[in-house]
Image: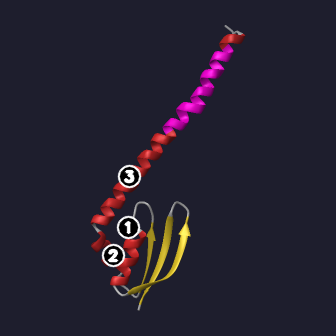
Amino acid sequence: MTLGGMEFLVVLLVLVLIGVIVIPAFAFIGALGLMGREEKKRKEAIANAPTLLAEAFSGESAVYKTGPDTLPYETVVTGAIERGYRLVSENAEPGNRKTLVFVRH
């Protein structure tokens, strides 16, 4: 059984539509799920901020990585200053992430 010219075009059109509509739609839905998980992790981190900051800032220096699923940058820097630390280095990384290095005054 062979496909005629019209049937071939219909099959080709269906495959193109799958590639143009269905695959990006699934990718979009997956991205929304990832953002939702990151937001949930950030809310949990904010709720536990005092504990997280106390653990991070307990020595002479501290390295803290921020991102969409961690404490916000401002919260980390403010918490460090309140604990007697100063920011000495900041490195931007892919994915809206930063590595922060602090030392105690």
Q: Is residue 18 magenta?
A: yes
Q: Secondary structure at mark 3?
A: helix
Cα distance between the residues tagged 3 and 1: 14 Å
Are dots 2 and 1 in contact, CB under 8 Å? yes
Say what amino acid the circle numbered 2 marks: Leu
Give the residue at x 49% y 41%: 28
> Residue 45, position in %: x, y?
33, 64
Q: Amino acid at mark 1?
A: Leu
Indicate whether residue 22 is drawn in magenta. Answer: yes
Q: Which mark is residue 53?
A: 2
| Disc nearer the start of the sequence (2/1) | 2
Neighbours of disc 3 within 10 Å: few (<14), some (14-19), many (20+): some
Circle 2 crowding by C-alpha within 10 Å: few under 14, some 14–19, many from 20:
some
Residue 71: mark: 1
Query: Is 25 located above or below residue 93 in the figure?
Result: above
Q: Is residue 38 left or right of residue 7?
A: left
> Relative to 19, is 65 on the left or the right?
left
- The picture places residue 18, in percent across and down from the top left corner, at 57, 28
- Whichever of labels 2 and 3 marks the residue nearer the N terminus, that label is 3
In screen coordinates, is 47 left or right of 18? left
Principal secondary structure, stretch drawn in magenta: helix
Q: Residue at x 37, y 85 (%)?
A: 59
Residue of label 3 = 37
Q: Residue furthest right?
A: 5
On the image, which quarter does residue 93 sit in? Answer: bottom right
Q: Which residues are magenta?
A: 8-26
Quadrant, the C terminus: bottom left
